[in-house]
Image: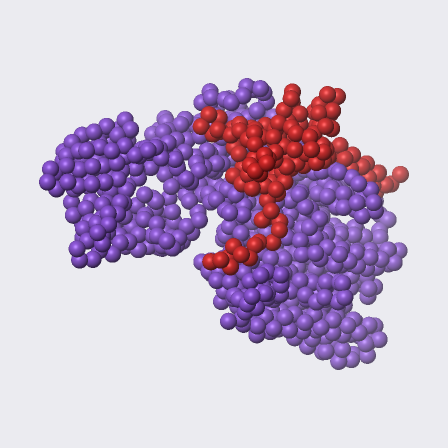
Chain colours: A purple, B red
């Protein structure tokens, strides 16, 4: 049954949202005109508000309709079919919502609605801002809602509707020509890499950050438009902080997801999709700093305008980059091309022309001080810091845009073939590392100067203690790492040493500021706190990336080719099942495949699961236990929560201490995407041990031809070099998965095989059912054996068994150590706390109090130094 | 000269440096012929090559060598570039799982002696880029 109603409701809501955005934008525009403002006429404003609320309600209705389509598995809709499936748990249905472009636009629209409603209702005193700011908001909403409009005018496609029916999307598919009411039984599912809890919260955070950059932009535009060139900074500043923290945290969440789910061996890959968010974030942080500087010393207003506007344009550019398909080969995870690149480009161009035009037109009217800043002004160093942040952003932007240059040159008829740098890490690190270093140094120096009197003596006084502590701790770390074997790395690279010193200096300098403020007004120390966070992040990145060490070096001595013995890293090791291999200080053995079973903590060995025709159901062949608790008894049917994922049990045993732990890296062979391997991470205080499967043995095993043995009870035979004892047979009444009727006979052999590490009890079954013999052999994966009970001769009490052998199972894995990666995550949290403190303080900052000094300078640097 | 002017000049200088370094580090899409030429000229810079796997008349991939039991970090194959030039490629990593299904292969690396040593392989599989095939689920 095709339910067209819900889609019609959704689509109608999109149209309503689009129209009301136009109405609201126009009405707010009218309300913001000087004539209307002076007359006190609120009718335009009331109309605009009403329209925006209707717009908000329509957006909620769109979201409800789309979620209903996914939740109720309405596969007659393309969106549900291509992004969801029957077995998807609810929390991942939320991520389906934004797997597609349309849904993620919707998420962005939704946050704009929320922020717009907040702006309309908070700050009642600042009503003079409502009309011009909300006019901008609604104006942006017109563009965004048009992206999901799905209307074709002539040859022009405007937006892509998420409510399109399968039969309309694939009108040529024969199945729809035969039966237009055909509904697929199941969807093609959510990209398995997105089936991760971080993917439930990372996109909303990121889009909230995107949406929040609109607020300072709208204030800046309103300021230019209404001639309030200086007043906009104050209401915009807490929002700029808010955007800074959400975007920053969103970026790190994405990095953490990549660390946990992908297998490129780190948290940052310089993928264009990652860069596209990192670039505006850097510029936004620069903008926050110039705005803060302006609040105190009336300097940097023009810079604030430029940076706030640039931030928003870069957000639009990021959208264009990741959604227009322009990246092509350059990115592994951009959205599929919906053929909307023209529309996206038009928007980008429209906003760029509007914003830059307004700025240039008013440039001369923007007040600027001619006063020179001295070297002992905190502001002076803040501006340098902002400039460094922007340059860092510029480097990433210049490189990430290489595919855009190609397209552009192709557009004007010149064929270019530029590609992204072959070694991206080296290319970006070359600049980002130094930018990080300078930012760390400046964040210390500028903070100290900001809180002091502007003279040399007082600065020297302030810097002495942090500088001494820095030297003390850095020498300690250098000595400890080089002379003693305590730390997981040897810090002997002077570039890294310099970065460490700069970061430690930032930590101590900012710490001294917090200590100084703790008695007076600790609420002002948000800047110092977030700078400490940034400095810690830099240290975490320095150690975890700079000293990442691969421990799975292939030392077997078996090499295919010795062509380039020195240059090649052989980073992957083959592990035979149950044969330990030495890696670093561990002895590692692969012990078999495991599955996730619903309701059972941990993982269950596939050997005790009997798979059924339904891939999501299995029958227990032994008691399913976790710890001492029995969750399922032999013969129970249990549910596999993700049968496509296999977990490979690895035992890491420390050769010195004898302590062992288990890791379960995950892999699935996806029909569309190949081997998707996710790492297993063991966290120690000073390092993470990161292991992932890089290749697995083919699923189909090649068995030798069956060898038959005639044996009697108690006989001992040698099978594939293993000693096996045949204890006899017994009748069984119940066989899991087989229904036994009157007259059917099921016999089970009892054999014991002595393996290298343990003994195996093997119970092949022979069932006589309806006069036919059914064989249920048992496989012992550990030993590469398959035993079949072939025949029973009750007269002579002799038995016939068949044995096949195969190669033992193997996996290829890669393992590495990442020292102190925890410092990066801790630093992120501290940065976020600092930002939140600053938001609280900046939004309480009433107009009457004299501008109080507070500054934030710093940047997270994602220089992946290798 | 005012401080702000010096400041501006330095920033512009750094920006130009960044552009130069980007231009210098940017790689290019080339053919094997050009990659060999570069190696002859002593240019070790890494390049991108786009190609297809060599297949026999039945559509089976030929000359693919990967035996993890001997060396899990050695994978060799023959790639045919857009000019139909064949070249042996070596990749010192495990074989990507869906390699056989790929329609197009983009490799990054350079020529060493008479083989192309790839350090990155990007596969373009039909299903990844073309819309999923409805019959796959329609048959369920």
Q: Position of residue A67 (x, y in %)?
A: 54, 66
Q: Position of residue A747 (x, y in %)?
A: 19, 46
Decide: is A724 above or below B101.
above
On the picture, is A106 further left or further right than A622? right
On the picture, is A28 further left or further right than A669? right
* Quarter of the figure with residue A129: bottom right
The answer to which of B64 and A214 lies nearer the viewer is B64
Q: Position of residue A567 (x, y in %)?
A: 59, 22
Decide: is A44 above or below A193.
below
Q: Can the viewer see residue A265?
A: no
Decide: is A331 above or below B66.
below
On the picture, is B112 further left or further right than A358? left
- Identity of the residue drawn at 80% across and 37% down: B16
The answer to which of A804 and A612 lies nearer the viewer is A804
- Identity of the residue drawn at 86% across and 55% down: A360
- Identity of the residue drawn at 39% across and 35% down: A702
Q: Quadrant of the N terminus of chain B?
A: top right
* Quarter of the figure with residue A54: bottom right
Q: Can the viewer see residue A648?
A: yes
The answer to which of A615 and A265 lies nearer the viewer is A615
Q: Position of residue A799 (x, y in %)?
A: 17, 37
- Identity of the residue drawn at 26% across and 39% down: A788
What is the residue that sits farthest to the left in this orientation?
A795
The answer to which of A397 and A594 lies nearer the viewer is A594
* Quarter of the figure with residue A347: bottom right
């Amino acid at each position: 049954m095709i339910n067209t109603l819900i889609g019609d409701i959704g689509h109608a809501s999109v149209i309503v949202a689009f129209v009301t955005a136009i109405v609201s934008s126009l009405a707010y525009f009218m309300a913001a005109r000087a004539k209307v403002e002076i007359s006190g006429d609120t009718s335009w404003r009331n109309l605009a508000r009403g329209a925006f609320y209707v717009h908000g309600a329509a957006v909620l209705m769109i979201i409800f309709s789309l979620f209903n389509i996914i939740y109720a598995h309405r596969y007659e809709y393309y969106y549900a079919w291509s992004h969801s499936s029957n077995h998807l748990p609810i929390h991942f249905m939320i991520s389906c919502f934004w797997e597609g472009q349309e849904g993620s636009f919707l998420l962005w629209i939704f946050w704009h609605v929320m922020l717009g409603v907040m702006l309309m209702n908070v700050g009642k005193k600042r009503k003079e801002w409502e009309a011009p700011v909300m006019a901008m908001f609604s104006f942006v909403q017109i563009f965004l809602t048009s992206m999901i409009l799905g209307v074709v005018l002539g040859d022009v496609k405007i937006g892509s509707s998420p409510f399109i029916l399968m039969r309309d999307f694939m009108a040529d598919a024969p199945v729809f020509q035969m039966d237009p009411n055909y509904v697929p039984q199941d969807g093609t599912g959510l990209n398995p890499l997105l089936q991760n809890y971080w993917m439930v919260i990372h996109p909303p955070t990121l889009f909230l950050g995107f949406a929040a950059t609109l607020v300072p932009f709208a204030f800046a535009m309103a300021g230019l438009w209404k001639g309030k060139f200086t007043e906009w900074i104050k209401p915009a500043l807490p929002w700029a902080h808010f955007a800074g923290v959400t975007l920053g945290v969103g970026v790190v969440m994405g990095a953490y997801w990549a660390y946990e789910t992908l297998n490129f061996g780190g948290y940052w890959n310089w993928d264009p999709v990652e860069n596209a968010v990192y670039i505006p974030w850097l510029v936004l942080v620069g903008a926050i700093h110039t705005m803060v500087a302006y609040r105190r010393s009336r300097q940097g207003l023009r810079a604030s305008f430029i940076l706030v506007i640039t931030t928003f344009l870069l957000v639009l550019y990021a959208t264009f980059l990741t959604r227009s398909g322009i990246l092509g080969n350059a990115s592994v995870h951009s959205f599929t091309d919906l053929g909307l690149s023209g529309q996206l480009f038009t928007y980008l161009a429209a906003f760029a022309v509007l914003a830059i035009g307004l700025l240039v037109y008013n440039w001369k009217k923007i007040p600027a001080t001619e006063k020179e800043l001295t070297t002992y002004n905190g502001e002076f160093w803040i501006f340098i810091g902002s400039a460094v942040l922007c340059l860092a952003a510029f480097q990433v932007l210049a490189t990430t845009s290489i595919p855009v240059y190609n397209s552009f040159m192709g557009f004007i008829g010149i064929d270019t073939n530029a590609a992204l740098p072959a070694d991206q890490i080296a290319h970006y690190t070359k600049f980002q590392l130094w930018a990080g270093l300078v930012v760390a140094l400046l964040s210390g120096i500028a903070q100290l100067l900001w809180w002091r009197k502007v003279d040399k003596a007082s600065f020297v006084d302030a810097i002495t203690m942090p500088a001494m502590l820095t030297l003390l701790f850095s020498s300690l770390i250098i000595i400890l790492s080089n002379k003693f074997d305590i730390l997981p790395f040897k810090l002997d690279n002077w570039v890294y040493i310099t970065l460490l010193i700069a970061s430690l200096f930032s930590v101590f300098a900012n710490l001294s500021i917090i200590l100084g403020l703790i008695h007076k007004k600790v609420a002002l120390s948000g800047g110092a706190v977030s700078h400490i966070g940034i400095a810690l992040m830099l240290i975490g990145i320095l150690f975890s990336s700079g000293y990442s060490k691969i421990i799975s070096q292939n030392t077997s001595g078996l090499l295919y080719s010795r062509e380039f013995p020195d240059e090649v890293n052989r980073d992957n090791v083959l592990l035979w099942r149950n044969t330990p291999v030495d890696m670093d200080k561990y002895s590692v053995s692969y012990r078999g495949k495991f599955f996730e079973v619903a309701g059972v903590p941990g993982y269950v060995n596939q050997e005790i699961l009997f798979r059924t025709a339904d891939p999501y159901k299995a029958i227990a062949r032994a008691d399913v236990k976790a710890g001492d608790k029995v969750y399922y008894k032999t013969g129970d049917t249990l549910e596999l929560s993700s049968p496509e994922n296999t977990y490979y049990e690895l035992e890491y045993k420390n050769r010195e201490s004898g302590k062992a732990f288990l890791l379960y890296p995950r892999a699935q062979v996806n029909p569309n995407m190949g081997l998707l391997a996710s790492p297993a991470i063991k966290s120690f205080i000073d390092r993470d041990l990161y292991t992932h499967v890089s290749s697995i043995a083919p699923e189909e095993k090649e068995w030798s031809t069956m060898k038959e043995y005639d044996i009697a009870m108690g006989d001992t035979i040698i099978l594939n070099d293993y000693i096996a004892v045949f204890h006899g047979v017994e009748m069984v009444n119940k066989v899991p998965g087989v229904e036994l009727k009157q007259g059917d006979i099921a016999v089970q052999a009892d054999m014991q095989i002595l393996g290298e590490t343990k003994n195996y009890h093997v119970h092949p079954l022979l069932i006589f059912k309806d006069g036919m013999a059914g064989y249920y052999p048992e496989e012992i994966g550990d030993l590469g054996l398959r035993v079949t009970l072939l025949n029973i001769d009750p007269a002579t009490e002799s038995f016939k068994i068949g044995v096949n052998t195969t190669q033992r199972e193997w996996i290829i894995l890669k393992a590495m150590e990442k020292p102190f990666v925890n410092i990066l995550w801790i630093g992120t949290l501290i940065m976020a706390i600092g930002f939140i403190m600053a938001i609280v303080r900046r939004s309480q900052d009433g107009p009457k109090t004299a501008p109080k000094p507070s500054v934030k300078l710093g940047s997270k640097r994602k220089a992946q130094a290798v | 000269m005012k401080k702000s002017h010096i400041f501006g000049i330095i920033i512009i200088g750094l920006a130009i440096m960044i552009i130069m370094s980007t231009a210098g580090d940017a790689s290019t899409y080339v053919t094997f012929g050009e990659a060999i030429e570069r190696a002859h000229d002593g240019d070790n810079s890494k390049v991108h090559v786009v190609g297809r796997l060599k297949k026999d008349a039945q559509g089976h991939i030929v000359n693919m060598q990967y035996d993890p039991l001997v060396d899990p970090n050695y994978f060799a194959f023959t790639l045919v570039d857009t000019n139909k030039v064949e070249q042996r490629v070596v990749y010192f990593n495990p074989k990507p799982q869906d390699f056989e299904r790929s329609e197009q292969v983009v490799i990054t690396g350079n020529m060493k002696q008479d083989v192309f040593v790839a350090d990155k392989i990007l596969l373009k599989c039909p299903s990844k880029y073309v819309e999923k095939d409805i019959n796959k689920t329609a048959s369920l």
